[in-house]
Amino acid sequence: MIIYCRLVPDRIRSRSPWIEQLATNEAPRPLDADVTTDVVVVGAGIAGVATAFFVLRNTANRVLLIERDRVGRGATGHNAGQLTTYFERPLSDLVDSCGFDQAIAAQRAVDGAWDLLDVMVAESGAQARIDRFVGHMGMFSLNHLQIHLRNSLLRERGGLRPPSCVVSEDADFLDEIPTEYSALYSVVPQSRVRELLGTTDDRYCAVLSDDGGCTNGALLIEQVLRFLQSRYQDRFRFVDHTPVRRIELDAKTAVIHAGEHRVTTSRVVMCTNGFVDHVVKNLVGSDIGAQMHHRVSGTVGYMAGFVEDAVRDAGAISYIRNAIIGQATPYVYVTRRPFGWPQGAATLTCIGGPEISLDDHATYTPDSDFPVEVIKEIDNDIRPIVDSTRAKGLAYDYAWHGLMAYTESRVRLIGFEPRNPLLMYNLGCNGVGFMPSIYGGYRIARLLCGESLEPSIFDPP
């Protein structure tokens, strides 16, 4: 039975469309005894499942995947479902702080996650729908354009394909665009900008377009996990409802206190979102900073969705709201995709953008109520930008929120803990974590194969 989210005086029940598509009749499978294995992966979201997939595929290691709740019910099941390969920091900023070679290598690696995703889907036989398309981003200032065109120029110099860009002939900064970028954009009528962005807000006068996609990531990893359990019965085990409480690192082994039992392992890979209460104790060296493995900076992103009977093409559009990139106001976005609806074929439209920051001691659960004031903000302030055809005040069929865990650098941490290499990380959503998580799993597997990789911006400090 479908229960619609209505505006009510005190509360709105949080309801993710992705979680609803998951299997609900699977019995809990907590760790029931002490165990010894080669690699322990902590966290069964996209990062943990991708890490387990590539480690099992590319090595002979035995793998235990530990989840404190249920698979896919964390950030992977409470996001916008978009697939992107950009960083939360401009590529030009990464070049300035990390150097050209490392920044371009990192961008090339994350771009390659599309191929890694294809490998996961093809080999696992996952049936979750994945839509690929060209996504668009709306810009309205010279600052926006210069930063993104510089990113494109750096990509081109590094041998990477730059995104396409159009600028309205009505843009008041058209004559101020530096000539070095002239080959990276074309001038079009304002009507073309409107068409690409699907908005009547003529403040937006430039569009950046690049490869994108969307999927129900929680459903995808649930299906990949079933494959791993079947394909690697002799080397893989998955447990849930098993919180990790303490990790003790010696010179050659790690002991994990998980639930009521102990796990002895040669490596442990943290694939959590950071907001967990485990303790890491390094018995053979200096203390490992807590900020590396938990209590990272957290932001909660809010989304609402509605279902239309008509079937529309899948797509995603974002709209910058700051005049200067890097200012505090988050961008907003809309994602559309075909959707399985009891009444038949339909389209789910997701709108998002509002965020709140959590302090180090905040308690967050994705099932907590959705704030009424946020649904009003989405309907009053964001809906007119992203979908002016939808009437104000209509009920939303879904309203949900998810945690985005930010590392200090806003770059994913992938690799060995410098103070004790028994501990590894594939950690840090940074707002756009799905595709980097997949690359992270692949990189972890390469490290466990003994490959000597070049220094990277992903290396834990």
Image (spheres, rainbow, N blue to C red):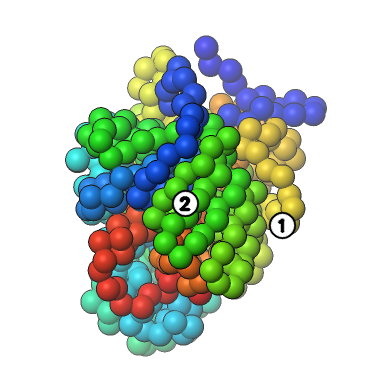
Name the residue nearer the viewer: 35 or 20: 35
Q: Is residue 263 left or right of residue 186?
A: right
Residue position marked by numbered label 2 in the rendering: 271
Q: Residue at x 41, y 14 (%)?
A: 343
Which of the numbered marks, if any, corresponds to residue 335?
Answer: none
Name the residue nearer the viewer: 394 or 18: 18
Q: Amino acid at mark 1?
A: Asp
Name the residue nearer the viewer: 14 or 294: 294
Q: Is residue 209 above or below residue 27?
A: below
Residue lying furthest bottom in this view?
179
Q: Residue at x 27, y 47 (%)?
A: 56
Image quadrant assignment for residue 409: bottom right
Disc 2: CA contacts within 10 A as few (<14), some (14-19) or many (>=20):
many
Residue 320 x %, y %:
54, 61
Q: Amino acid at mark 2?
A: Cys
Q: Is residue 219 above or below residue 273?
A: above
Between the C-alphas of marks 1 and 2, the distance is 19 Å
Which of the numbered marks, if any, corresponds to residue 360?
Answer: 1
Residue 323 visible in the picture? no
Q: Secondary structure at mark 2?
A: loop
Going from N to C along the chain, the mark reached first, 1 or 2, is: 2
